[in-house]
Amino acid sequence: MFFFFAGGVEQQVRQVLKSGAGRCIACRSPADLVDYEKVLKLFFVPVWRWPGKEPLMHCNNCKLFFPQNYALPPPREDSTAEELLRCRVCDRRVEAEFSFCPYCGSAM
């Protein structure tokens, strides 16, 4: 007899504790401090949920979960326009009229 099994465990956001608490370590976009839960899925249907141990940072852009102590500091409120015109991927300064980074080719 042959049995086919499709399942896995994934993390999901349960509650946002603090919005914009830091920046993502992968894409440098704003990240939230969240309570999360782990979900066991069988054939893509949630079967069992259990809470995470401690709050984590969650990036809404790239959907990455990472520990709070790894987070980059949140952007300053008094930042100038020059600081805002940086590529999210390679962190180089880019002119405002560009839609794509001339150094790495990623979308701005």
Image (tube, grey):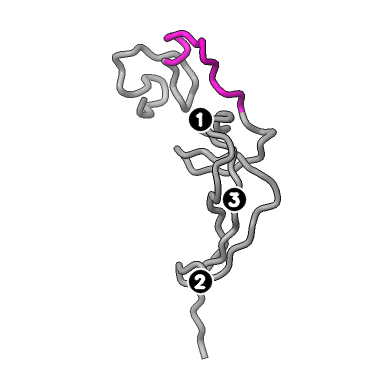
Secondary structure found at label 3: strand
- Nearer to the camera, 45 or 28: 45
| Residue 96 drawn at (x, y percent) | 33, 13
Within-10-Å neighbours for mark 2: few <14, some 14–19, many 20+: some
Q: Residue furthest bottom?
A: 1
Q: Say which residue appears at 51% left-offset and 15% top-offset.
A: 77
| Residue 61 drawn at (x, y percent) | 45, 37
Q: Quadrant of residue 38?
A: bottom right
| Residue 69 drawn at (x, y percent) | 69, 33
Residue marked by disc 2: 42
Q: Which mark is residue 30?
A: 1
Kind of residue sitting beneath label 1: Pro
Within-10-Å neighbours for mark 1: few <14, some 14–19, many 20+: many
Secondary structure found at label 2: strand
Residue marked by disc 3: 36
- Nearer to the camera, 58 or 17: 17
Q: Are marks 3 and 1 in contact (CB under 8 Å)?
A: no
Q: Earlier in the sequence, mark 3 or mark 1?
A: 1
Total marks shown come to: 3
Of badges 3 and 1, nearer the viewer stands 3
- Above or below, 23 against 37 in this view is above
Label 1 vs label 2: CA separation? Answer: 32 Å
